[in-house]
Image (spheres, rainbow, N blue to C red):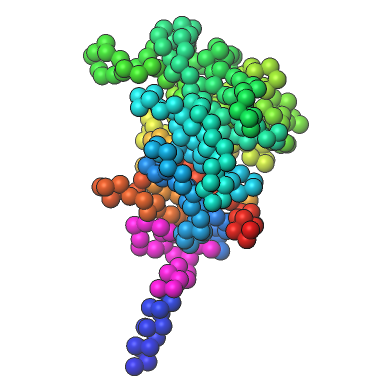
Amino acid sequence: MKKTVIFLVILICLMICPTCFLFGQEIEKKAGVTVYKPDKFYKGYTLYNSRQREEATLIDMKGYIVHRWSYPQGFTWHYTELLPNGHILAIIKEDYNNHIGGILLELDWESNLVWKMNIACHHDFATLDNGNILVLCREYVNNDAIYPGILKSDCYLEVTPDKKIVWEWHADQHALELKDFVDITFPIRRPLLRRNTNKYPPNPYDWAHTNTVEVLPDNPLAEKDKRFKKGNIIFSMRNIDTIGIIDRESGKVIWAWGPGVLDKQHIPTLLENGNILIYDNGSGRRNTKILELDPLKEKIVWEYKANPPESFFSNTQGSSQRLPNGNTFIADSNNGRLFEVTPDGEIVWEYMNPDLHSNGKPMALYRSLRYSSDFIERLLSK
């Protein structure tokens, strides 16, 4: 009788709070939180959006949904980010083959439309102190110095709240400046579609595939090297394995690095210590790494890779975020997996996307962000 009562008490508790009995252990689950070590992870709230849906989801550390935004447009959301006022900004990615022109959406906490702009946006944006948005956009150009033929290229556009473009930067116009810093040969010889054929893919050649725009904040590195001063822009050109810095005033590329080390990377982020955190997809080597680069010495000072290395591989997409406690939050995007690691590589939190394809596999997650408890709980209390 006593054993029966104890069993029923445990069963009821598990039904009320299934993660209360984790005791810092891994959980045998295919979706939701699968690793939970509260004495080691950074407590906060996680924002993600599944690539095949028109919504974004905010979860707590136990995997419970605390809020969701949705605004159906007929096209899936590519990337979302919370604004300081609790609104959400979402990208519907420009897509040449499917003739989607691209849309930038701002929704309030209740998913009401605040602002919308039809613009050829893709991958990333940055909100500026002046209230404007710096958005990464697609364009189609001719530039024989890069490649003879139509190019799919990228540009940065600064857009005001009333939808005026007040600053722009076009990647193809600055391609040759990269040669001052990295070993890149122009014009580029385009890869063949298949071996022993002269047929090329039907779409324009995506020479750079820029996937990041980040405006540099105040940082200690700027005191040593003005190239990294506040307001300059860090970029990532995936298809040429290159990250770099744009001088905001002149528009020139003033620093670049990567070929020979990076392998189809994403989201270089300047850290508070002056180093750059990089999500290195490893498309060629078939395993993904998170790198921390000292940009002045051009030396890797920390890295995370799985054991065995091939167990963490996101061929495309992905993000990494250095958390206030020194841990790193990572999106294993192609596999629909989010996880947090300590500086010595221990996984202390893991979440598998419960949104599934028809084949039962988790949907991809382009990027994800962890927000502090204080920030989210202020929004929840309004």
**48 or 298, nearer to the observer:** 48
Q: Does residue 251 show up?
A: yes
Q: Does residue 303 show up?
A: no
The reply, left or right, for residue 206 in relation to residue 300 is: left
The reply, left or right, for residue 212 in relation to residue 316 is: right
Q: Position of residue 6 (x, y in %)?
A: 39, 86
- In the displayed image of the protein, which residue is found farthest to the right? 223
Q: Is residue 339 magenta?
A: no
Quarter of the figure with residue 177? top right
Which residue is depicted at the point 65% across and 18% down? 251
Q: Is residue 33 magenta?
A: yes
Please identify the dominant SS of the magenta region.
Answer: loop
Q: Which residues are magenta?
A: 15-38
Q: Position of residue 232 (x, y in %)?
A: 67, 27
- Location of the N terminus (image quadrant): bottom left
**58 or 349, nearer to the observer:** 58
63 in relation to 163, above or below:
below
Which residue is depicted at the point 38% across and 25% down? 99
Q: Position of residue 343 (x, y in %)?
A: 56, 49
- In the displayed image of the protein, which residue is found farthest to the left? 196
- Location of the C terminus (image quadrant): bottom right
Q: Position of residue 139 (x, y in %)?
A: 48, 19
Which residue is depicted at the point 46% across and 29% down? 102
Quarter of the figure with residue 52? top left
- Callout count: 0
